[in-house]
Image (cartoon, helix red, strand yellow):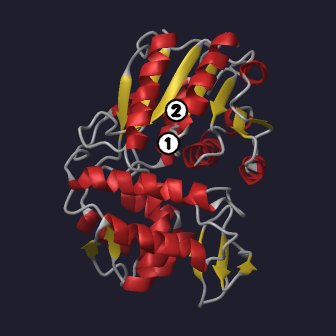
Amino acid sequence: MAASNVRVTMLGADSFYGQSIIREWVKVNPEQARQIHAITHSQNQHGQQALRQVGVQQVKSSDYQNESQLAKEIEGCDYAIMCPPVGPEFMKEHAAMAVKACKQARVQSMIVLSCLGVDAQNASSAFKNCHAIESLVKQHFENNVTLRIDLPTQFFDFCVPTIHESGNLSLNAGNGRFAPIDMADVAKSISRITKNKSLEHTLVGEVYQLTGPHAMNGNEISEAMRKAARGQMPKGYQNISRQECERELNNIYQNAGSAQGLRQQGGGMETRQAGRTQQPQGGKVQGQQDIPVTIIEKPSLDGYKQTISLFLDYCDLAQKNELSMATKDVQTLSRSQPTPLEEYFKRESQVYNRLA
């Protein structure tokens, strides 16, 4: 349990990573998570609303262009958490400004959420931006710790509608492996890191690689999904090109309605069919013809595409055997075992039971 007087700011709290982690953090340590100072992008009103819906009490917006204003929002915080950038413009427009503002606000410690594989030779530009941000924070903050995250299990929620279409889990990962990590395990790790006002000296300057318990390929992930759903789908795994995978996932957005996006955020589920909205009753989605997806109302198409692009970047690295590992770093930080992928699928039964 964190000390009640520890203050934590999360920069980019309205991003996929930010919302996914806070959504789980509220379950892990409600008192601590609801006191987070969530800094969002000024134009993302729906992201701000989603954070309030899960119980975050202090949600502030910033354009990340006014250092003094941003510093004022951060002032008094012991920790600042920087979420991974999604768009390629984040590094030059936001990250440097955020670091300056944290410095001006006299933040004591920085936690950088990054992506496993950022230092790979074949890393994408988005991953390289994460690596640059790691270096930027290390340059300006002595008290820093970096958490490099493997493929989040929450990304697989995007795939459910495509499995309904083809019967298979289709990814651009070849026969490569990754060790998908539940964002709940990331939340547990952060919760323990921030339990005291000062960063533990054993953590200072360290880089942790947060993964699930097992490195898995597409066939093994497909089997875990099928077992959890206790059904016939997915029938198997199919390797497809990045372009095909991107097209299929973007079609989900279009089929759900031009003003709607599909994302594992916001703490609630809605179903979409031909532009109709149905709210679940009693924890179950009504209507056999609807394919369930978890969404935030009206996110931008650009934001959705950028999140999908990051998903595909992970798959590219897996195909090149850059992610074929599992570590014990989650256990080291959180004092608990990481969640097996099949257990995640079972926990999110509202989504995955529809594959039965």
Distance between the Cα atoms at labels 2 and 1?
A: 7 Å
Name the residue at the bottom extreme.
Answer: 289
Residue for badge 2: 91
Circle 1 sits in a helix, a strand or a loop, which is it?
Answer: loop
Q: Would residue 289 be found to the left or right of residue 342 on screen? A: right
Residue 243 location, quadrant: bottom left
Circle 2 sits in a helix, a strand or a loop, which is it?
Answer: helix
Residue at image location 60% in from the left, 32% down from the top: 93
Q: Is residue 94 or residue 20 the one in the foreground?
A: 94
Q: Is residue 319 or residue 157 the one in the foreground?
A: 319
Q: Which circle marks residue 219 in the picture? A: none
Residue 128 location, quadrant: top left
Q: Amino acid at mark 1?
A: Pro
Residue at image location 29% in from the left, 54% down from the top: 316
Whether 242 is drawn above or below 24: the answer is below
On the question of residue 146 being in view, the answer is: no
Please tell me how many numbered marks the rendered image carries: 2
Position of the C terminus by quadrant: bottom left
Q: Amino acid at mark 2?
A: Met
Q: Position of residue 139 (x, y in %)?
A: 46, 12
Residue for badge 1: 88
Q: Label 2: few (<14), some or many (≥20) within 10 Å? A: many
Q: Are marks 2 and 1 in contact (CB under 8 Å)?
A: yes
Residue at image location 25% in from the left, 56% down from the top: 216
Q: Is residue 5 or residue 131 the one in the foreground?
A: 131
Q: Position of residue 228 (x, y in %)?
A: 40, 70
